[in-house]
Image (cartoon, rainbow, N blue to C red):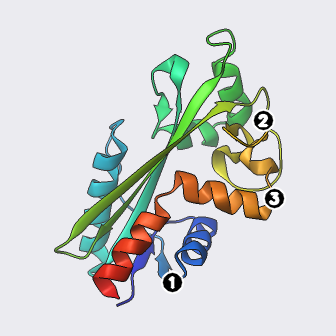
Amino acid sequence: MKITFATGNQHKADKTAQLLGRDIDHEKVDLDELQTTDLAELAEHKVRQAYDKLQRPVIVDDYGLGFESLNGLPGPFIKFFIEASDGLERLCRMIDNLDDSRRAYTTCVIAFYDGTTLKVFEKTMLGTIADHPVGSNGIHTDQIFKPDGYDGRTRAELNDDEYDEVYRKVRPLDELKRFLDEYYG
């Protein structure tokens, strides 16, 4: 059975299909976003909406970037910060003088729903925020998030193999793949 990834982000859809090793459809669907800091609650709400609109098995994902010195904010509201003028640089400035360590974490939730079965998968990765945006690869916060274990480089500075490795560490794709393989064969 074919699954549809409800996202407006073609890069994310392509990367997900590649790493799942599965042909999935991609469709941009306008979905309401709950105003919550709970990514799992947000993803569940969105996947149910997407299913209601598409009437076929669907996945959605939601991503958050949390600064430890700001008790996890901006979290799932990160896209609003990125969309602002000079958003990535402003995010770097937000934690100046708050925390010398610049500790942060990314969390990704992927939800699947087929009208009967709901599955929610979540992963978190630790790292730090760069002093300024750096690198040219990737999307969204990749230019400012430096995952632990990669010599202080941002995700946008990683080579393709390292980028895919980190992508798997922050997105619960392996868990989703195991579920889909067992559920759909």
In the rendered view, does 173 fall on the left or right side of 132? left
User: Is residue 100 placed above or below 184 in the rendered structure?
Assistant: above
Q: Earlier in the sequence, mark 3 or mark 2?
A: 2
Residue type for callout 3: Asn
| Badge number at residue 152 | 2
In the rendered image, the quadrant that contains the N terminus is: bottom left
In the rendered view, does 148 fall on the left or right side of 26? right
45 or 30: nearer the eye? Answer: 45
Q: Mark 3 — residue?
A: 159
Q: Secondary structure at mark 3?
A: loop
Residue type for callout 1: Arg
User: Is residue 92 placed above or below 112 in the rendered structure?
Assistant: above
Residue type for callout 2: Gly
Picture residue at 50% right of the left edge, 31% below the top: 74
Q: Earlier in the sequence, mark 1 or mark 2?
A: 1
In the rendered image, the quadrant that contains the C terminus is: bottom left
Q: Can you give x and y, in whole percent of width and height, for residue 127 in the image?
A: 63, 34
